[in-house]
Image (cartoon, rainbow, N blue to C red):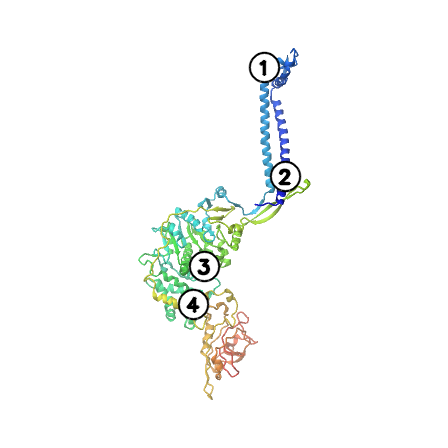
Amino acid sequence: MSFRPSDITKGGQITAYRVKMFNQVNNWFSFWIVTVLMGASLLAFFLVTPPEIISNGLTYWIARSSESFLGLVVNDTAKAFSYAIYRGDLKLSEVPLTLGDVLRSQIMRDVGDVFLIRLEMYAGVGATLSLIIYFILMFGVARIGKKETADEYISGMTRTDSPKVVNKMLAQNRALSPIKIGPLHMVKNAEIQNFLIHGTIGTGKSTIIRYLLDYIRKRGDRFIVFDPGGTFIKTHFNARRDFILDPHDARCANWDLWHECQTVVDYENFASSLIPIEGNSDPFWVSSSRTICADTAMRMSRKENPTIEDFLHTILSLSLKSLREFLKNTPSANLVEEKIEKTAISIRSVTTNYAKALRFMQGVNQGQDKFSIREWIQDNRQSHSGLFISTNFLRSTRSLISMWLSMATTLLQSMGEDRNRRVWFIYDEVASLQKIPGFRETLADARKYGGCFVLGIQNMAQMSDTYGRDNAKAVLDLVNTRIYGRSPSSDMATDVQNELGYQRRWESKEQNSFGLDQVRDGISIGRDKVHEPVVDKEEIMSLPDLRFFFRLPGEYPVIKLAVPYRDLPKKAESYIERSFHDSLSPLIEKIIEHNESEIPADFTEATPAQAVGQSKAAQEQPATADELPDMPVPAPSVPAPGAAKADTAAPDNVTDIFARVKDKVPQTQPGQSAAAEITPPPVREAEPGPAARVSEPAQNPAASAEPAPVSKPLKLKLKKLGNQSDSDSDTQEQSHAPVMYQDEDKLIVLDESEIGEDGRIVDAMAEEEKNILVHRQPLADTHEEPEL
């Protein structure tokens, strides 16, 4: 270490000034303490000691001090001293004595010794009191100085590094919980207010969960743990009373869908959990897939001993015609109608993307009794049992694992209210799962049913990605005990810093000044009001493994704690590979592969997964010409040269399109938002009639060689061409007869009641103009037939 001359100057000036200031204070206190206390001691001596001892003792010691002069005296006859005789405080008489008499007298010698002993005693007491008072005053002065220069707490969070301090506070408040993580006790009943363990990989989140599992086992509570990788199976699995749900593990329980679902709501929860609305995806495709999935499973419950293989074969491999017949008279029947078969194919592709995870449950321990989470969680005999939901292949089983955890979460309320019961839901890496429907509501109400949730996440951004920013905040706001480990990124560390809280205080600042003249030497002390975090993000970013910040519910400080690592004995294999030989149906594997690649040629080239993942912004914006799908447009027929123009009915595609609009069936496909389609006013199909028959155009090679362009959304300024049913005008009301209108080169069929006086389409319910999205072919010239 090197020093600059200025460092020596500054250090010397500051040190010299501080030494001078200390000596000044020390001398001032020492002088007055010694003077006052010694004077008080002497005063007490003369007030308490008998006058006979004081008088004769002083005489003896005065004579003793003159003993050196005794050899110079030729004749010791001068009686310069006397011995006083007292009765109490009253002096009775005096006996004259010479110097030799005083020194030789044993009585005077004894009185002198008593006098000296008493004087020494009082002087010693005075000196001792002086030192005691000196240190007391110094301590008091130092305390005043420390108080004046220390920061003063105003409000906000506080911090400590000692778990003993917090344990003492908990004991004083009668809130000491038997749950311990290392040396730190939790708050009493804090488990029903939920736990959050936050930290990057390898920080020790699993170590904390093991402490909780030890307590759960000791208490005998029921628990469900999501255990990716089998970490907790290895240390806490008991084969006699615990269950494993892992389709790739040979110990997987024989879970049965139709034992799990008992009511319509159960089947809907099953479908909602299996097929989530992820990110900003279009809800139309997900809702349609959920409806078909739930209705199919519910219909199969009528069958004796239905299996997952039967379910997958029905929902994925049946022809749409057969599936349509199977789902007849169900809410999902309209979604597989023949006239929207291309939409149905796309819906089935989305269903395949999520339902395919169920195929791994084919042939799982078929010889065992059927297992359901519902029966397990409602069976009081399973009070000491644990359910380990695990996987080493989360990517391929994500929807299945998420469905199990979601249904377990939902089933908590079926147990009935009991605040003394404890059912633990330990979801490590919960953000890696699909969104659990109703998770926020379950966390809010779980304490009434004895539910205790422990959520482990790597960072808050994961939760925002899975649940959405606002919903993730709402979920995390329902977790009261928070444990934060290392977050290496600045953004995540800032979030943790904000979560641990801030403190408002008066901060003391000291300034030194010095110069050649001692007049310039001095120290100034000031105070500023500051608002700062109790833990800086830099400290969070650099935390070592197994170091955590605990924030307990209530008025307790933030605790920095080193969690002791424990090497627990191995109780079971974390994973026993299951053989899928003869378990997976080759037919279903081929069907899944086919369905995932089956995309209508005239819809879009996007995959089903991409279709579900479209941006939510696309739902809120009207479709542009480039975003509209290419609908097939029939090529106009060409009459023979010289042939008369025959009356023809409206093209088939016109009738189909109007029928779809009238039936309000969404005509979107994956990649296009269903919300972008605007429901038009009621439209009637064009009926064959004189007004609907138009001349066919001449052959246009250019038009037949290239695909028809797609028109843009427009507001129609319409021109009436005539009634479709003029020939039957005597049997129909003129105000509601179908009328053909033309807007420049476009054709549409509407009721007259739907056209305003200005020629614009009017929605009688909303009394506002509507955008109509219809795909039409522009007229080549004035003699061509207007087509849709």
The foreground one among 348 and 704 is 704
Label 1 to label 3: alpha-carbon separation? 106 Å
Asked if the residue at tag 2 contacts the one at tag 4, i.e. Cβ–Cβ closer than 8 Å, the answer is no
Amino acid tagged 3: Lys
Going from the N terminus, do you reach mark 4 or mark 2 first? 2
Going from the N terminus, do you reach mark 1 or mark 3 first? 1
Q: Residue 435 carries which label?
A: 3
Residue 239 percent coordinates (x, y) = 34, 51
The nearer-to-camera label among 1 and 4 is: 1
Label 1 to label 4: alpha-carbon separation? 126 Å
- Alpha-carbon neighbours of circle 4 within 10 Å: few (<14), some, or many (≥20)? many
Residue 778 percent coordinates (x, y) = 51, 78
The kind of secondary structure element at disc 4 is helix
Label 4 to label 2: alpha-carbon separation? 86 Å
The nearer-to-camera label among 4 and 2 is: 2
Q: Name the residue under label 4.
A: 347
The nearer-to-camera label among 1 and 3 is: 1
Quarter of the view holding residue 332: bottom left
The foreground one among 75 and 136 is 75
Q: Name the residue under label 1.
A: 107
